[in-house]
Amino acid sequence: MVSKKERIKEDYNKSVDTYDSRYREIQFEKFRIMLSGIELKEPVLDLGCGTGLLQEFLGKRVKLFGCDFSEKMLEKAKSRGEIVKIVDLNKKFPYENGFFNTVLSFTVLQNVKDVNNFLK
């Protein structure tokens, strides 16, 4: 039996070719609203970066690291210029505390088992 987490990962891997056309507009609107008036201090982490739409939105003006658990999504994010790492956000985080000056996450909490633990 496939776990819920593995099913979600499979779904993201399968949707990589249609993800941007389906979600670009809504994601860009989220970015515009949430980043309005915020100074991004590098290095910046995009948790649950998906295909790297945030990198596309920001352009090359910000050094952006992306974490996701979908290998296919990360391939696309890397092609956009993100420095990517595969990460299971329900497990140990692979970066040291204090490594990032800004941490962003737009569409990942719905896929995290224990939100309180994740935020710690």
Image (cartoon, helix red, strand yellow):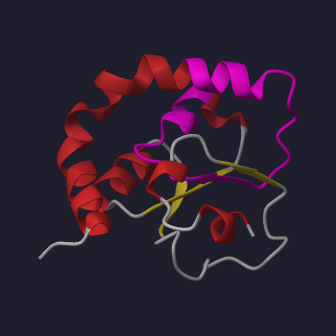
Name the one closer to the observer, 31 or 53: 31
Name the one closer to the observer, 119 or 81: 119
Q: Judge whether residue 47 is colored magenta.
A: yes
Image side of residue 16 versus residue 118, left or right: left
Image side of residue 26 versus residue 103, left or right: left
Residue 12, image x, y percentages: 28, 50
Q: Where 91 sits versus 25, above or below?
A: below
Q: Quadrant of the C terminus?
A: bottom right
Residue shown at 64%/67% (left/top)? Answer: 118
Residue 97, image x, y percentages: 80, 76
Image side of residue 68 versus residue 61, left or right: left
Q: Quadrant of the N terminus?
A: bottom left
Residue 105, image x, y percentages: 62, 47
Q: What span is colored magenta in the figure?
A: 29-57
Task: Give the quarter of the image for residue 32.
Answer: top right
Image side of residue 34 versus residue 114, left or right: right
Residue at the limit of the structure toward the left, as seen here:
1
Residue shown at 48%/34% (left/top)? Answer: 53
Residue shown at 51%/73% (left/top)? Answer: 90
Residue 119, image x, y percentages: 71, 63
